[in-house]
Image (cartoon, rainbow, N blue to C red):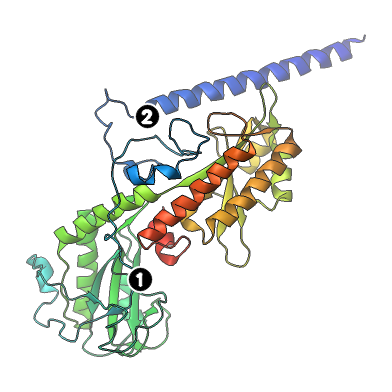
Amino acid sequence: MSSLQIGLIVAGIVLVVGVILYNVWQERRLTRRVAQARPSADRPDANVPARAGERVEPTLGAQRASTTPASAPEGGPAFRSGTARDSTFEPPLDVIAPPTSFEIPDDVPTETSAAAVATNVAPSDASVRVASPHTAGHGRAAPKMAPAPDHEIECLIPLQPAAPVAAGALAAGLHARIGKPLRWFGRPDARSDWERLASDTPGRFSDIVACMLLADRNGAASRAQLDTFVRVVGDVATALQAPFTPPDIEHELARAESLDRLCAELDVQIGLTVQIREPASIAGTRLRGVAEASGFRLSQAGRFELVQEETGVVLYTLQNLRPDPFSADMLRLTATNGVVFLLDVARLADPVRVFDQMKLAARRMAVTLGAELVDDKRRPLDDAALVRIREQVEAAADALRTVHIEPGSARAMALFSA
């Protein structure tokens, strides 16, 4: 055997040992991170609300016990993206009403102006009402629900300018950034449908509504955000000479907290893990090739996404089982021991059907990579376990519908966004 061959053998051994040591180091680093992030009874931050930090897949309360998959024997869901927490909260069914048309009352107060903001005027009777399907528009049949103000999940402030204005006159409000999504709607008259406004929206509008989302995956709207929202709208109202009534901040804060708590209880993500037994690993280049052949595309979020071409909706994602996000460089230079197929129930119009698709894709990838399809306890998933997880998906979707959040709807996409 020549010295060159001996050198190549030694170099190969060193490379293999180096990869193994690197994987061990990565796992230990993850273990330390998880230990530091996990709340415990001894730590002062153990009661931090679930939505205030990392994303959590919570349980659905005592009445939703049947939604927990049997593949997680301790009662946990099939996949958790954050720290588990116990909860006895039962979602109140009256927190969110069915979508309805939004009407500005005929008797909008005229004595309240932008000056009310400076003096903290907050009348008890807000100048916003939601017409029921039977009474919308003073006896007219309620129009079909279209992109429009949603009083149940947004704080609304209506404006009626002294004269119809172009959307460009709202530039200060349209471009405001306060930490929660803002939407502005307008219509030429009371008989017209609401239209989402942008700076280049054509036409002139006599009715305007400013809307701020009360809760999303970053948590409930804060007092500072609500105060800023009112101030922004007040500035626009002054410029348009449009009297307006500020909302009751305490009431809106209470609505935001209730809405956030409800959504946290109903926020479910389902994951299926494809893992290869160590010390074997999956080369990043091979993983990328298999993922892209299956229709996935690498996103800037550090994961692969399967996108429905017609709508642009992400059906499910493929994430690294290790803590490192995927990137082109990472996939070219390193390996991993597994991936997680992740489905976001609330953001899909038909989550059960998409789960069936994801299950088949996960099985195919496991076979292709010589890996196993396992649960969150790293135990192989059989057909019975997958049926139970499917039932979890269906139950989670039904729970959302019970409180008038249709999975995949505009309302769901707003509430379950980060």
- Between residue 8 and residue 89, name the one nearer to us: 89
Residue 199 image point, x, y percent = 40, 77
Task: Judge whether 23 appears above or below 205 on screen.
Answer: above
Q: Residue at x 43, y 66 (%)?
A: 410
Q: Is residue 61 left or right of residue 276?
A: left
Task: Judge whether 213 appears above or below 170 on screen.
Answer: above
- Identify the residue under disc 1: 99
Answer yes or no: is residue 340 visible. Answer: no
Answer yes or no: is residue 391 visible. Answer: yes
Residue 121 image point, x, y percent = 8, 68
Mark 2 closeness class: few <14, some 14–19, many ≥20 residues within 10 Å = few
Q: Residue at x 26, y 22 (%)?
A: 42
Mark 1 closeness class: few <14, some 14–19, many ≥20 residues within 10 Å = many
- Between residue 332 and residue 418, name the one nearer to us: 418
Q: Where on the picture, by quarter, is residue 88?
A: top left
Query: Which disc is residue 142 wearing?
Result: none
- Identify the residue under disc 2: 38
Residue 49 image point, x, y percent = 29, 41
Which tag is nearer the camera, tag 1 or tag 2?
Answer: 1
Q: Secondary structure at mark 2?
A: loop
Mark pair 1, 2: CA separation: 38 Å
**Total number of numbered discs in the rendering:** 2
Q: Secondary structure at mark 1?
A: loop
- Between residue 19 and residue 222, name the one nearer to us: 222
Q: Is residue 340 left or right of residue 396?
A: right
Q: Residue at x 28, y 77 (%)?
A: 132
Q: Amino acid at mark 2?
A: Arg
Q: Where on the picture, by quarter, is residue 402?
A: bottom left
- The answer to which of marks 1 and 2 sits earlier in the sequence is 2
Q: Where on the picture, by quarter, is residue 380?
A: top right
Q: Amino acid at mark 1?
A: Pro
- Locate the N terminus and report the quarter of the image it occupies: top right
